[in-house]
Image (tube, helix red, strand yellow):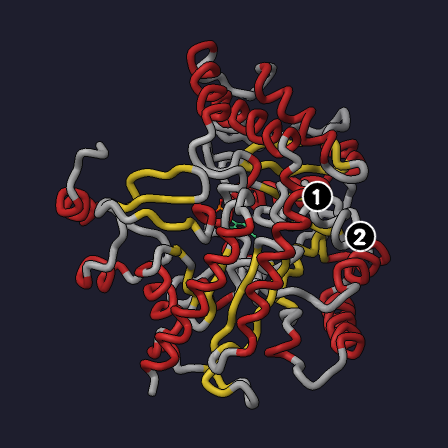
Amino acid sequence: MNKMTTDDILTADTHLIQSFANLHALKQDGARTAIVAAEGAHVTDSEGNRMIDGIGGLWCVNVGHGRPEIIDAITEQLKTLDYYSTFYNFTHPAAAALAEKVASLAPGRLNNVYFGNSGSVANDTAVRVLHHYNNLRGKPQKKHILSRMGAYHGSTHMAMALTTPQYAEGWGAVEGLVTHLRAPHKYREAPDLSDEDFLAELEKDMLDAIHRIGADNICAFFAEPIQGAGGVITAPPGYHKRMHEITREHDIAYVADEVVTAWGRLGHMFSSQDVYDYTPDIITTAKGLTSGYQPLSATIISDEIHEVISGPDAMFLHGMTYSGHPAAAAAGLANIAILERENIPERVRTTGKRFESNLRGLIDMNMVGEVRGSHFMIGIEFVKNKDTREEFAADAMIGLAVSRACQERGLIARALGNILILSPTLIMDEPMIDDIGAILRESIETVSDGLG
Ligand code: PLP
């Protein structure tokens, strides 16, 4: 397949529907990039350009591309047992061993793992499990969910309802089941308040919603430790711990969507407890669980919830053909072995901090309004006017212009409106980190100069 020329690929690609794309413009303007190979922290396109993978595939290739250990584990697994399900009374070694491993790494009493094949499915599973749990507890009305503006929880119908409403514009989403609280984004929501005062406002927003809807009607609060696809939004210090206390006080389950923030990206296997000091009732995760070598997600459920859903009168009527697929589970085990053996989360505490402070240095540039995020999860917001925080018009496509300038200089970065997202592999060394900083500075300068 690598023998296909760029023209061959783009001709065939007319039949492929890309995700989150303006399909019309995409097929017209020829700006598609065909990635044909990848190794370590780099990818190569069909024209032979080798570039730093500044977005780690899609915030997922944590251990880097082309790891023989993972590829061999998948191959060996397929030779021994290509497929069997985990339905009914069936299990198999890879799924069982990975569930045990994930449970041993997850915080608190999160000891029970349901595998799916995407982050969206992990979040849908969490919703179904909590609805079932509340039915079994004799609280069938406790179904409503609190989420937040700026959230991204996936693209299945339910996960999209949890996601910030802008993503469903022109499509529609499940109605009536989700209330979106304020985004915890001080720069845009409350620039003039102190962190403490903004946190007090966010607490009030949550409590008002609970009183309005009624705690007896709410089953869950969904939150990413750092909002990723919403623009890498970090909440004020103490936010998650306080929101967690509020959920405790009102018998509402806290679901931490760690699809991106787990598996070393913020310097720990999971970030909810180790970085933000709270233990959720459910963690959903995917991406770095296999570093993207196989599609796999996990919904990790507390013993308290599990005791109810595995009670004598309960029946777990939920299942996906590929839940715990042997090849995906083998990839997960090999990937976690690398994360542990190479101490990747610990190393990220140094390298990721260098990356973060390097990129934070771009704040001295004219067009850069805010640099936010943590370790290897960074967002750069471009503004027309730094003092007033005035945004560029959407059709200025500033993020896209900067990402294209980066790509010409050998770095893939992701544009999201006026925001540029960087989430590289976690194996970046110091020279590579410094290269990214330099490429970004030059690219931003070029676009900024072009604006006149
Ligand atoms: N949750 C978060 C925080 C994500 O960033 C994503 C995807 O980017 C998802 C859920 C959905 O995961 P998937 O695309 O694997 O369905």
Question: Would you say the beta carbon of the disc 2 residue lies within 8 angstroms of ligand 1?
Answer: no
Residue 202, horizontal then vertical, whole percent: 73, 72
Q: Is residue 96 above or below residue 16?
A: above
**Tag 2's secondary structure?**
loop
Q: Identify the residue under disc 2.
A: 277
Name the image quarter holding residue 263.
top right
Pick the residue in front: 176 or 87. 87
Q: Residue furthest right?
A: 249
Q: The disc labelled 2 sits on which kind of residue?
A: Asp
Q: The disc labelled 1 sits on which kind of residue?
A: Ile
- Neighbours of disc 1 within 10 Å: few (<14), some (14-19), many (20+): many
Locate the C terminus and report the quarter of the image it occupies: bottom left
Residue 66, horizontal then vertical, whole percent: 42, 32
Q: Which mark is residue 282?
A: 1
Residue drawn 24% across and 59% down? 31
> Does the image show residue 90?
no
Per the model, the C-alpha gap separating discs 1 and 2 is 15 Å
Pick the residue in front: 3 or 238. 3
Q: Residue furthest bottom?
A: 388
**Tag 1's secondary structure?**
strand
Locate the N terminus and report the quarter of the image it occupies: top left
Pick the residue in front: 281 or 89. 281
> Does the image show residue 122?
yes
Residue 350, horizontal then vertical, whole percent: 67, 50
